[in-house]
Image (cartoon, grey):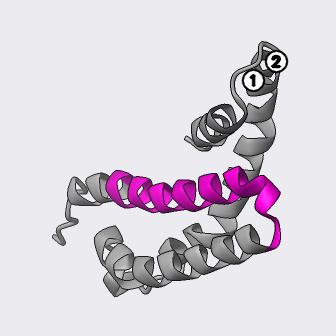
Amino acid sequence: MATIIFWSIIISDQGFDTLMLAGIPLSMLPIGISCSIVIILTILPFFWNSDKANRDNEVVFKRYFPYYAITSFSICLYGFILVTEVYFFWFSAFFTSLQAWIWFTKSNTKTTKHETKKTSI
């Protein structure tokens, strides 16, 4: 998703050039690595560190997502103000991080709803 947003903004701003065809696949690796690092460092700790009683991902999402969204928006806006030349990076970082929250909440909620309860003998 980040690659699509990143290149859509660049192409809409600068127009499409045939030399960009080589850059699109080459950019997938660094964009993917940076997105993975950001997700592991900033989003997953909320799910990993939630107390066991409130381990349901919808509860974690409702509790922490608004604060994360406000903080993420503030950081991206600050970065945009400082370095406007790479505004496409800030937009793609913001929207990808918000979408990652939704992916984690939906994917993990499905697995927790289908878990079987242990019964004692």
* CB atoms of marks 1 and 2 within 8 Å: yes
Q: Magenta residues?
A: 82-107
Image coordinates of residue 81 in percent, x first then y, are: 74, 73
Considering only vertical position in the picture, is 120 above or below 99?
below
Q: Is residue 11 magenta?
A: no
Among the 4 quarters of the image, the one containing residue 60: bottom left
Q: Is residue 12 left or right of residue 55?
A: right
The residue type indicated by label 2 comes to Ala
Residue 117 image point, x, y percent:
20, 64
Left or right, 101 with respect to 94, comes to left
Q: Amino acid at mark 1?
A: Pro
- Which of 32/46 is in front? 32
Q: Quadrant of residue 73?
A: bottom right
Q: CA distance from mark 1 to mark 2?
A: 6 Å
105 inside magenta stretch: yes
Mark drawn on residue 102: none
In the rendered image, the quadrant that contains the C terminus is: bottom left
Determine the residue located farthest toward the top in the rendered image.
Answer: 18
Q: Nearer the viewer, mark 1 or mark 2?
A: 2
Taking 58 as reference, is 99 left or right?
right
Q: Residue at x 49, y 75 (%)?
A: 69
Count neighbours of disc 1 (C-alpha within 10 A) and say few if under 14, some if 14 to 19, many if 20 or more.
few
Of residues 19 and 56, which is closer to you in this image?
A: 19
Tell me the residue that label 2 is attached to.
22
Q: Which residue was labeled with disc 1? A: 25
Q: Residue visible at 50% across and 56% down?
A: 100
Q: Residue at x 75, y 52 (%)?
A: 34
Q: Nearer the viewer, residue 53 or 121?
A: 53
Magenta stretch, main secondary structure class: helix
